[in-house]
Amino acid sequence: MSYDKGQATEEFIRWSESYDRCILQWLIFGPSHRALIRRIRKMVGDRPARVLDVGCGTGLFACRLRSEMPNVQVFGVDLVAEMLEKGRDRWHRHRGQVFPVQGDSERLPFASGVFDVVTCSNSFHHYPRQERAVQEMARVLRPGGRLMIVDGYRDRPWGWFIFDVCVAAVEGDIHHASARRFRELMQAAGLGSIAQYRHRGPAPFLLNEGVASPGSTVVPAPHFTSSVVREPAAVVR
Ligand SMILES: C[S@@+](CC[C@H](N)C(=O)[O-])C[C@H]1O[C@@H](n2cnc3c(N)ncnc32)[C@H](O)[C@@H]1O
């Protein structure tokens, strides 16, 4: 049976307790966060920007980003309330600057065309409908905004062994998309200037980038009709 959101929820309720201390922080999460921050800094510089982090977990990346780039306002969205809740102290320290929201990557609870950057790190392989998730991430980008998705790089033998064999043995029927598949998904969502950056290491990862066409019109969301960014209806108060 293919992996579904019920399994993702169960997995992350279990994992939430130890998530911030697990060895993957050192192996892949930390390095991928640093790579994303370098890219965002390069794109945005010191300008004010609004960033959405999809699958934000306990807020490690969202809060790191805000600490390193004080002009950005960061929203984080995650399916699993327990993951958001585990980052409670962190969210509190960044209150008014970083906003955690519970929601699903396939139905983002935000208006269209409101973010300068959308990030997604180490979460994408959990999405049962990856095409739909990329469409949603593209929808909430402003024209000219940039999508950045990081996930395990499984196209070479070592990455295949780590992600398609070892990680799949632990997590079940998750799906790490190939580099080619990422390009197809971004193109299908109307993104252009697609670039991919491969990071070597014990757990290799791929950073995939695409730009919402500067001339694109903002597509309305049938499930979200407000004209503004959702006010931070955070689960963590
Ligand atoms: C491995 S963690 C990554 C967390 C964080 N992005 C990081 O790099 O540390 C994956 C996260 O994706 C979330 N997730 C899984 N499926 C999701 C979905 N459909 N929509 C939003 N978040 C989801 C999980 O709850 C979990 O917090």
Image (cartoon, rainbow, N blue to C red):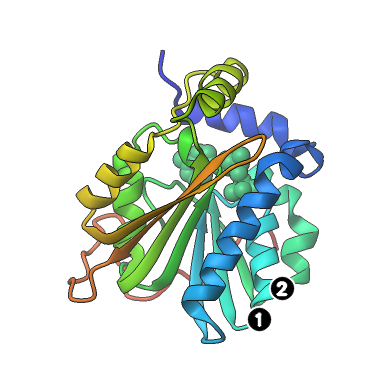
Q: Nearer the viewer, residue 183 or 56?
A: 183
Quadrant hosting residue 11: top right
Which residue is rendered at x = 54% and y = 42% of the image?
A: 205
Q: Residue furthest top?
A: 1
Does residue 110 appear to the left or right of 67 in the view shown? left
Does residue 89 appear to the left or right of 185 in the view shown? right
Q: Residue 132 carries which label?
A: none
In the depicted structure, whether residue 68 falls above or below residue 137: below
Q: Can residue 57 be seen in this view?
A: no
Quadrant hosting residue 140: bottom left
Which residue is rendered at x = 58% and y = 38% of the image?
A: 204
Which residue is rendered at x = 47% and y = 19% of the image?
A: 173
Q: Mark 2 points at which residue?
A: 67
Disc 2 to disc 1, how far (Cα)?
6 Å
Instruction: Please say if the residues under marks 2 and 1 sit with CB atoms less than 8 Å apart.
Output: yes
Q: Residue furthest bottom?
A: 47
Residue 85 placement (x, y as % from top left)? 71, 50
Secondary structure beneath dot 2 equals helix
Quadrant hosting residue 26: top right
Q: Which mark is residue 70?
A: 1
Q: Is residue 81 visible?
A: yes
Task: Please name the amino acid that badge 1 sits on.
Answer: Pro
Which residue is rendered at x = 31% and y = 67% of the image?
A: 112
Quadrant housing the N terminus: top left
Does residue 136 appear to the left or right of 70 in the view shown? left
Residue 72 placement (x, y as % from top left)? 57, 78
Residue 47 placement (x, y as % from top left)? 51, 87
Quadrant housing the C terminus: bottom right
Q: Quadrant of ligand 1?
A: top right
Q: Which of 159 and 166 is in front in this view?
A: 159
